[in-house]
Image (cartoon, grey):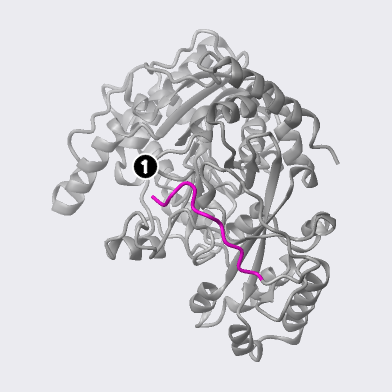
Amino acid sequence: MQSLFKPVVAIAVLSTAFAQSLPDRRLLNGWELHNEIQVAPGARSAVKDYLPSFLEYQDLVMFHPKFGYYGSGRVSFSADYQTFPIVLAPYFGHMIAEHIFKMWRGMRAAGTLGPGDRFTIAEFGAGNGILAESILEYLEQRAKSAAAPDGWREFAAQTVYACYDRSPALSKAQSQRNARFGSRFEAREGDATAPEATIRAGSLKGVVLSNELPDAFSVHKVILSDEGDAEVAFVAPSLPQDRWEAIRKDLSPEVVKTVEGGDRSIREKLIRGNPGPVYLTRAAFTALLEALVPTRDYENTVQAFQFQEVYVPASELPDLAAHLRRYARVYALELARQERGVLTYVNLGSEKFVQGAARLLKAGYVITLDYGSNWQGMMAQDSHPHLRTYGPAHVEQVQNGDPDGQNGDYDTSDPYRGPTLNDMTTDVNFSLLSAEGRLAGLKTLYFGAHKALRKGTSVRLDTPPPDRQADGELYDEFISWAQKFETDANYKLMVQQKDGSDPSYIFPGTDPEPLESDEKGLTETQRKRATSIEKKLSTSYHK
């Protein structure tokens, strides 16, 4: 891990009129700033007119249908990274199926699900569809068993599994994998941060399920100072002049005009300086990537992009400012506890997802599996950054014997290396999911390490499935991940229930973890600082 107080170096050359010395950030994790530059105070409000926010940048490189890592289908669920539903298949899905069966049985007993109703398992961000396959296969097995417990046949007959994904390529893969289940399986395109655009509010009885979904939502990169000042990151992409000249001749006149016109605008409005790289506006960055996709030199050109960050007051983005005001108290408590500022990641998509899921449900549950923490864990800085990248560059780094980036070959917190070629993921703030769900009528029944998923089920993980027993490497991989499932505290499970679904249902997990911020550990001085910070966050971020 690099030093928490590594100085940040600006690499842009600015004119005297626009040159601004970088502030002393006093951040616990200042090393997560990437090539920060500043524009003159009078130009800060114009930044959003030309440059993408960090959230917009992440959304483009991850989800654009033509070049995005997920949107284009470039993702590899084996070479780039693995997940528990894949490595522990089919048993991971079996555990979830047993819990959902109990939820279904409780809703039937409570009368919130009638015998003629459709019971839907709606999985958002379903990846390659293997979790759906594991669950549907298990329902078939239990329904056909001569010793099937009362209800499994009716449960299987009443259940429809529906996958929703932003990526057309992944939606197609889910359909192909699960075509044999016929009308009991559906795959549709849908955005988890706007679920009501796909499913009518109040129309769903069942379960909204996700595994490692909110961590893939695009986030705002935010600096919170130790005094309560809040600034949000915008991204300034650029290409070295020689690289631009090398590819310029192969581009259409329209793309060239967009790129060079955008560079002039940025230099006139934001960064007046000596000749240097070709700066790209939001529109130029998108147009250039779209134009590069068909070329054989795509990956090399993408690796040549350079990125700098510009931070402007959070008031420039009203939805972010509203979030900071709404949760001013908890941010203030954690900043007072740390006694330094922090660079943090605000996932507004998770708010939209959980509130949307609540509105979809007429009765039922939301099951969220992901890695993350509560408010205190999200603000603290420990052994790994809260935003990380995985993919070909990460694999290359590990093979070179530098898994932590200590030799400078690759930093897993660097979101700018190989844009569109790697996954980008952020720890999930489960306290935020719980609070936002509560506003929409969801009661949190359980939050804790995801090993609780095995509680109350008949599933065992001590023996790999038959298809892994004949291959020593696959056998060892399963055993290793099964041990990780039981011991890794970073992976969490949250179960939420829509109001009125079933008053008697209790999730069988033990050892729940706290979701609220603990004020008891603060000193009197820290309490006073928290009050001051809260006041600033509550009142300062209005346009």
Residue 514 vs residue 409: left or right? Answer: right
Where is 300 relative to 137, above or below?
below
- Identify the residue at image location x=17%, y=36%: 463
- 523 or 140, which lies in front? 523
Residue 400 vs residue 85: left or right? Answer: left
Tell me, yes or no, whether the highlighted magenta stretch contains residue 6.
yes
- Quadrant of the drawing holding the C terminus: top right
- Identify the residue at image location x=62%, y=13%: 500
Q: Secondary structure at mark 1?
A: helix
When asked about the image quadrant of residue 259, the answer is bottom right
Residue 94 vs residue 157: left or right? Answer: left
Q: Which residue is outermost to the bottom?
A: 249
Residue 52 vs residue 208: left or right? Answer: right
The magenta region covers 1-12
Crowd tier of the residue under label 1, counting other residues whose Cα lies within 10 Å: few below 14, some 14–19, many 20 or above: some
Q: Which residue is mark 1?
A: 85
Tell me, yes or no, whether the highlighted magenta stretch contains residue 476.
no
Looking at the picture, how far across and down is residue 127, in whole percent? 47, 50
Looking at the picture, how far across and down is residue 217, in whole percent? 58, 46
Give the dominant element type of the magenta stretch: helix, strand or loop: loop
Residue 487 seen anywhere in this rendered image of the structure: yes
Give the amino acid at mark 1. Answer: Pro
Looking at the picture, how far across and down is residue 95, in whole percent? 35, 29
Where is 504 relative to 105, above or below?
above
Where is 88 relative to 367, above or below?
below
Q: Which residue is outermost to the top?
A: 504
